[in-house]
Amino acid sequence: MSAEAAAAALDEPTARTGGPKDDSPWMEHVLGWTLVVVLAMFLTQTGLITGLS
C-alpha cells in the first residue's frame, strides 16, 4: 500500500454500527435512572422487596 493510499484510507469515515452517538450522555443517564426507579417501584408493589426490617 502506498503512502497516498494509506492517507486516503484514513480520511474515509469509519463504518457506524447504528449504536447511540456519544454526543449527549445525559439522555442515557436519565433513561437509565428512570429504568432503575420503575423497576424498584414494580418490585416493591409486587412484594418482592419488603424493606430492610
Image (tube, rainbow, N blue to C red):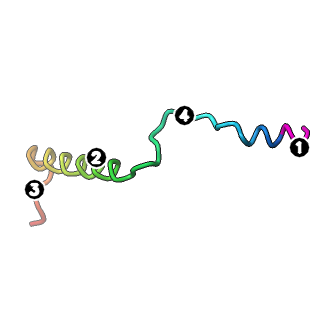
Q: Give the range drawn in magenta.
A: 1-5
Mark 4 or mark 2, earlier in chain: 4
Mark 4 or mark 3, earlier in chain: 4
Q: What residue type is labelled 2?
A: Leu
Q: Which amino acid does label 4 sit on?
A: Thr
Q: Mark 3 points at which residue?
A: 50
Callout 3: 10 Å neighbours few (<14), some, many (20+)? Answer: few
Mark 1 or mark 2, earlier in chain: 1
Mark 3 and mark 2 in contact (Cβ < 8 Å)? no
Q: What residue type is labelled 3?
A: Thr
SS state under label 1: helix
Q: Name the residue under label 4.
A: 17
Q: Which amino acid does label 1 sit on?
A: Ala
SS state under label 4: loop
Labels 1, 3: front one = 1
Mark 2 or mark 3, earlier in chain: 2
Estimate the spatial distance between the alpha carbons at disc 2 and disc 3, rounded to whole Å.
25 Å
SS state under label 3: loop
Q: Which residue is painted at 18% across and 46% down in the image?
A: 38
Image height check: is 27 above or below 18?
below
Q: Name the residue under label 1.
A: 3
Q: State the residue in front, 5 or 44.
A: 5
Mark 1 or mark 4, earlier in chain: 1
